[in-house]
Amino acid sequence: SYVLTQPPSVSVAPGQTARITCGGNNIGSKSVHWYQQKPGQAPVLVVYDDSDRPSGIPERFSGSNSGNTATLTISRVEAGDEADYYCQVWDSSSDHPGVFGTGTKVTVL
Amino acid sequence: EVQLVESGGGLVKPGGSLRLSCAASGFTFSSYSMNWVRQAPGKGLEWVSSISSSSSYIYYADSVKGRFTISRDNAKNSLYLQMNSLRAEDTAVYYCARGTVTTDNWFDPWGQGTLVTVSS
């Protein structure tokens, strides 16, 4: 089945830019979605279809996807962005199409 | 406001059964695919199962196939997950999440989750 690999952790200072990668075989040919999960809370969709933002999500959150790597970029990081982030694809060619990445803990220094 | 509310979690012995429910409101339930996602304590998200809007297409993760059954009642705006032959490794918070009206599938929004604990 399809595998998505993320770095376990990313650290960033307030005001700087955090980049979270999601690696998968030819992931550029798929649509990638990203979720933010804060402790004790349900996940929240922050980017869908590689780079679209749901209503209410700040423009500081952006996404890109090419080749074997998709990236979630958080600009002008704030303390409130500290959370776990997960990428996800829907692998429609598979009998088990739902796939999540391994997750990345973003720490704001 | 779109809202999803799960219920039915609890403590169950290994080999036992449990039925989770998800009550949906604030959107046209019958138009969207629906999903179950779980999260074991301290672990990442794991996709469990998905069902298309008319129940024509149903998918399961390998880890639950043959033991779990997803279903929906569009007249009651409700999603279900029947869980049989439960194992300790099924212990997790189970989230209900709305899917999409397209062939792609992302999850938005999510319910607050219901905890399932499998232990003797």
Image: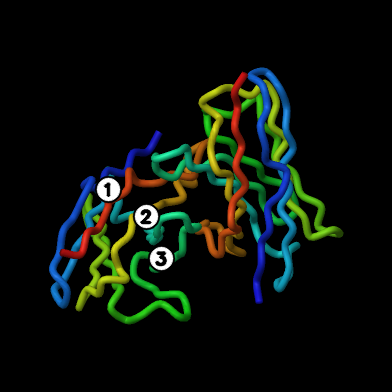
Instruction: First in sequence, mark 3 or 1: give its number.
Output: 1
Q: Which residue is mark 3?
A: A49
Whether pointer 1 and pointer 2 mark residues with C-beta atoms closer than 8 Å, the reply is: yes
Query: Are there few (<14), some (14-19), or many (20+) residues within 10 Å of tag 1?
Result: few
Judge whether B103 appears above or below B68 on screen.
Answer: below
Q: Which residue is mark 1?
A: A26
Per the image, label 2 sits on a secondary structure element best described as loop
Q: Chain of mark 3?
A: A
User: Does B105 sit left or right of A51 as displayed?
Assistant: right
Q: Amino acid at mark 2?
A: Lys
Q: Which quadrant, please, contains the C terminus of chain B?
A: top right
Q: Amino acid at mark 1?
A: Asn
Say which residue appears at 22% left-offset and 50% top-offset: A68
Instruction: First in sequence, mark 3 or 2: give its number.
Output: 2
Judge whether B102 appears above or below A54 on screen.
Answer: above
Q: Chain of mark 2?
A: A
- Label disc, if present, on residue A13 of the rendered structure: none
| Colour scheme shown | rainbow
Q: Which quadrant, please, contains the N terminus of chain B?
A: bottom right
Pointers 1 and 2 within a single chain: yes
Pointers 3 and 2 within a single chain: yes
Q: Which residue is mark 2?
A: A30
Say which residue appears at 62% left-offset and 52% top-offset: B96
Q: CA distance from mark 3 to mark 1?
A: 15 Å
Per the image, label 1 sits on a secondary structure element best described as loop
Front-lying residue, A92 or A14: A14
Q: CA distance from mark 1 to mark 2?
A: 8 Å
